[in-house]
Amino acid sequence: MIHLKKAQIDFTGPGTIVGLLNYKDLGGDKQTRNAKMTPRVREALLDIISNPPKKAFKVQRGKKPSEELVFGISNNVRTAWAGALEDAGLTHLGLHFHDLRHTPGTRVKKLIDLVDIANALGHKDPKTTAQIYINHTDQDLIDFARAVEQAVDAGYKQAMSEDIKPDLESRLIS
């Protein structure tokens, strides 16, 4: 995202970011991929391009960021991220740049397959996505407990409908 250029963004239709840069392994091969935009991302990018945030686009070390860049980050993500948080009034939340990858993965984990989440995040191996980019919540434990209860109830109902051994009911209830 640091090197994302305005020319890489196709705002027609739902919108596509073309040629997003990924790195395979630490310091490894560069790979590119395309990504679809949500309406919210599309609107945010249009807004950033139309109204560049002052802190993220400030002159650093006597050098102004390239006008071709979407985010105005030339080399220091930490400084630019801090400036962007300040521009947005979000410094009090303790957000980290990497939260931008964790949050969507966690939010969609019950809606789409892990393989699709991994693909969207640019991971070849879904294990990377599951182990690093999807956070587990208390709600997950609650949902698991409910699912176990539903499975037990379904098994009990099936056993009763099949009229298996007369004493089965007393064993399941106790």
Image: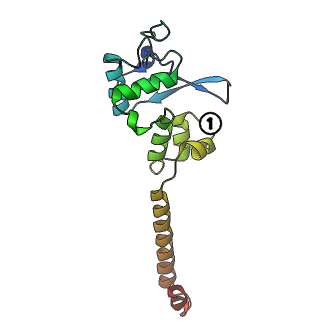
Q: Amino acid at mark 1?
A: Lys
Visual colour scheme = rainbow
Q: Position of residue 134 (x, y in %)?
A: 53, 46
Which residue is labeled 1 in the image?
Answer: 124
Dot 1 alpha-carbon crowd within 10 angstroms: few under 14, some 14 to 19, many 20 or more: few
Query: Relative to residue 12, is residue 18 drawn left or right?
Result: right
Q: Is residue 78 above or below residue 135?
A: above
Q: Position of residue 136 (x, y in %)?
A: 51, 52
Which image quadrant for residue 81?
top left
At horizontal 67% and vertical 29% (from top left) the residue drawn is 26
Residue 1 in view (yes/no): no
Residue lying furthest bottom:
166
Query: Which of the two residues, 109 or 88, is positioned nearer the viewer here?
Result: 88
Q: Position of residue 144 (x, y in %)?
A: 50, 63
Q: Which SS class for mark 1?
A: loop
Q: Is residue 25 above or below residue 56?
A: below
At horizontal 50% and vertical 40% (from top left) the residue drawn is 102
Q: Is residue 77 above or below residue 64?
A: below
Residue 95 in view (yes/no): yes
At horizontal 67% and vertical 23% (from top left) the residue drawn is 29
Which image quadrant for residue 133?
top right
Query: Relative to residue 111, is residue 122 drawn left or right?
Result: right
Query: Which of the two residues, 161 or 152, is positioned nearer the viewer here?
Result: 152
Query: Which of the two residues, 80 or 109, is positioned nearer the viewer here?
Result: 80
Q: Is residue 163 above or below residue 58?
A: below
Query: Relative to residue 39, is residue 145 drawn left or right?
Result: right
Residue lying furthest top:
62
Which image quadrant for residue 54?
top left
At horizontal 51% and vertical 89% (from top left) the residue drawn is 169
Q: Position of residue 17 (x, y in %)?
A: 45, 24
Query: Relative to residue 27, is residue 165 drawn left or right?
Result: left
